[in-house]
Amino acid sequence: MSFEFRILNFEFMENNILQIIYLIASVTFIAGLKFLGNPATARKGNLMAAFGMVIAIFGTIFLYTTETGAHLHNLGFIFAALAVGTVVGWIVAKKVQMTAMPEMVSLFNGMGGACAMLISIIEFKHLAEVDLSTVAAGHLLTIVLGLIIGSVSFAGSIIAWGKLSGNVKDKSLGMQQLINIGLLLVILVLSGVMILGNTAYTVELFYAVFALSLIYGVLFVLPIGGADMPVVISLLNSFTGVAAACGGFLYDNKVMLVGGILVGSAGTLLTIVMCKAMNRSLVNVLIGNFGGGATGEAMGSANFDGTIKEVTASDAAILMKYAKKVIIVPGYGLAVAQAQHIVHDLELLLEAEGIDVKYAIHPVAGRMPGHMNVLLAESNVSYDKLIEMEEVNPEFTTTDVVLVVGANDVVNPAAKTDPNSPIYGMPILDVENAANVIVNKRSMKAGYAGIENELFYKPKTSMLFGDAKKALTQLVSEIKALG
């Protein structure tokens, strides 16, 4: 009896220690998310949340016990999977370019959706081996929700990754939205029958819902235009969080529940922020196909007064050297050229001349919120020089020179002047209000939204053509040569 008591007491202590570990992990997730809201503390927040995840994983492996008192088995497979995942994730994260960050986020998010999907499949198989008629409707509902949301998130994220990497093209079927709505209704009806109907075909219905959810995930993302993919990624990220929360309910696991809720809520808030930045509703993003059908011909040069004026690096250097205030607008082209370090060198050089230099950051600059902030932080640009759109827009009227490096749609006046433009209503950086605007681009190719930029034809705008890194390097050399 004493021996059995000691065993029970040890198991009780193990369970309490595990719950304490889960509590600590949950706190680190919340604190880490808070720190991620500021570029200066983002790295600390990431490490803090990662630490919480590590202790939660190892606590579960060594301390979790089943209702029968058994510990986890197959530890060799578990640690092998952890090792493979860690190595692959580490290599991918180290090698990925900043320009491919949205693709990586989408791919990793898809893996999270896949995990939630597989958890639901495995748990359903366990129930099917016993007796599905004895399973509570609420328990089956949680499994089915995890299956649907996880499957949609997985399939949709993979298509989003393909679109962002250029391997999948925008494609819309006839009556695409009606097909999607009809498919979603079929999924919901079959799920309801399976959960409440107590039918003999529960297993068949489950796998039918699984297959239809994967198809819906593909069709859901396939017609959405490229310029809206960051919004879709954020939305799918929130789906993954909800699916993970379902797993937390399923296993009565507090840390899974907290983590899923945090991811789901953060993804939802980010989706709202991005829609607000483009002055569009989520419904409009999902059914409007922004960026999918626009072309450069939709707004050709014939619609604009004025002509393109090209400037040399030498003339641009003179203009900037004798300015009092310069604002740099970084964009995707800067990231592609990996010019973040040379743009910081330019900033330091101008400041040495007594020139006030700032960076104007659009909420979706570089494709995703925070993309430019992280990129410039790599080159040690001071955080207080990164000024958000609402704060910097009034300053353009007192700015001598604006240098636009690789940005396009976020500085396009058509967003305010052309009701027929697909970006009409989107808040932009008001660079046209500055005394002089220098735009660095490789060519006159249209931006991400597929339309030409009215700014390029303005009398005060000069085009500095060429790769951002090479052009800025030459610009720095010319300014130094002026003495």
Image (cartoon, grey):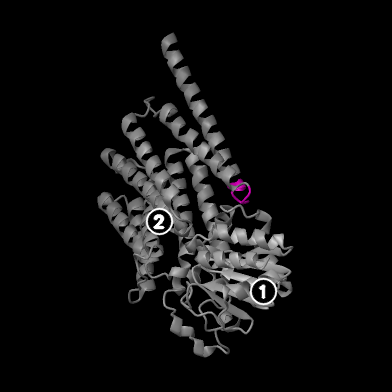
Residue 37, position as x, y percentages in the image: 61, 51
Is residue 363 or residue 196 the one in the foreground?
363
Image coordinates of residue 210 in percent, x first then y, are 31, 54
Res. 189 visible in picture: no
The numbered mark at residue 398 is none
Nearer the observer, 103 or 134: 103
What number of labels is visible? Answer: 2
- Using the rendered view, name the quadrant where residue 30 is placed: top right
The Cα atoms of the two marked residues, 1 and 2, are separated by 50 Å
Secondary structure under tag 2 reads: helix
- The answer to which of 144 and 281 lies nearer the viewer is 281
Residue 35 colored in magenta in the image: yes
- The amino acid marked with disc number 1 is Leu
What range of the chain is rendered magenta?
33-40
- In contact (CB < 8 Å): disc 1 and disc 2: no
Q: Is residue 173 above or below residue 16?
A: below
Residue 32 drawn above or below residue 176? above
Image quadrant occupied by the C terminus? bottom right
Residue 243 in view in this figure = yes
Which residue is painted at 58% across and 76% down in the image?
425
Helix, strand or loop for the magenta stretch, by majority: loop
Q: Amino acid at mark 2?
A: Ser
Q: Earlier in the sequence, mark 1 or mark 2?
A: 2
Which residue matches tag 1? 319
Front disc: 1 or 2: 1
Q: Which residue is mark 2?
A: 153
* Percent position of residue 133, x then y: 31, 43
Quadrant of the frame with the N terminus: top left
Which residue: 61% across, 79% down? Answer: 461
Foreground residue, 148 or 412? 412
